[in-house]
Image (spheres, rainbow, N blue to C red):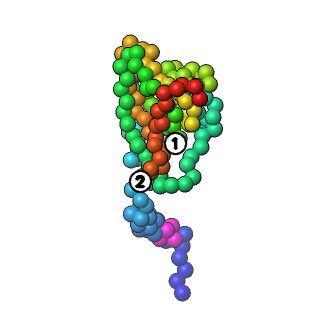
Amino acid sequence: MKRLNCRTVGKMRARARALILPLLLLATPQSAFARDYAQAKVEKLTVTSINYAGQPLAYPDSGKAEVTALVVHLPPGSSTGWHKHPVPVYAYMLEGELTVRTGNGIEKRFVKGEPIIEVMNLLHNGTNTGKKIASLVVFYTGVSGVPNVIKVEDPNP
């Protein structure tokens, strides 16, 4: 039996790595490559377990999940009208400003670039208190067959 020296063993290991590494790379899903995101800039907007009124976040636990995405444009001085959401809602201010008042007296102003973690099952009204159109993208993370918005005439909760 022929004995291998250290140099020969080193060459064999290098060849094995040269063969195995390409095979491993081929087996790796494309999305796992960090270079796919090398040009992306990520800005964390928020991480929270509560909405702007201090309510803990909750998700529907029954029914078929359904996401609705909208872009809403409110002219200066206009409002959403009093309403509530039986499902979780998240928004992002694209431009302008929006002041939201809840039925229990909480008031919060949102401006361009801010996320909105909406209140759930709490009456509220959003008003464009700025001088230009307020635009926001809204995501309802709801349940099929359940309305995302429930409008009310009487603002008293």
Residue 141: x and y, percent? Answer: 48, 44
Amino acid type at circle 2 is Ser
Q: Which residue is mark 2?
A: 31
Q: Would you say residue 101 is visible in this rendering?
A: yes
Q: Quadrant of residue 71?
A: top left
**Amino acid type for the residue under numbered disc 1:** Val
Q: Is residue 52 left or right of residue 83?
A: right
Number of numbered markers: 2
Callout 2: SS: helix
> 41 or 113: nearer the eye?
113
Screen quadrant of the C terminus: top right
Residue range of the region highlighted in magenta in the rendering: 9-14
Mark 1 lies on a secondary structure that is loop
Picture layout, residue 131 above or below residue 48? above
CA–CA distance between discs 1 and 2? 32 Å
Residue closest to the far bottom: 1
**What secondary structure predominates along the stretch shown in magenta?**
helix
Residue tagged 1? 87
**Rendered residue at 39%/63% (across/down):** 26
x and y percentages locating residue 35 in the rendered image = 40, 47
Residue at 43% across, 19% down: 128
Q: Is residue 133 magenta?
A: no
- Image coordinates of residue 132 in percent, x first then y, are 36, 16
Looking at the image, which residue is at 64% across and 31% down? 54
Q: Nearer the viewer, residue 40 or 124?
A: 124
Disc 2 packing (10 Å; few <14; some 14–19; many ≥20): few
Q: Could one spot residue 115 in this view of the protein?
A: no
Which comes before the other along the chain, label 1 or label 2?
2
Relative to the observer, which residue lies in front, 105 or 12? 105
Position of residue 157 in the picture relative to residue 24 (left or right)? right
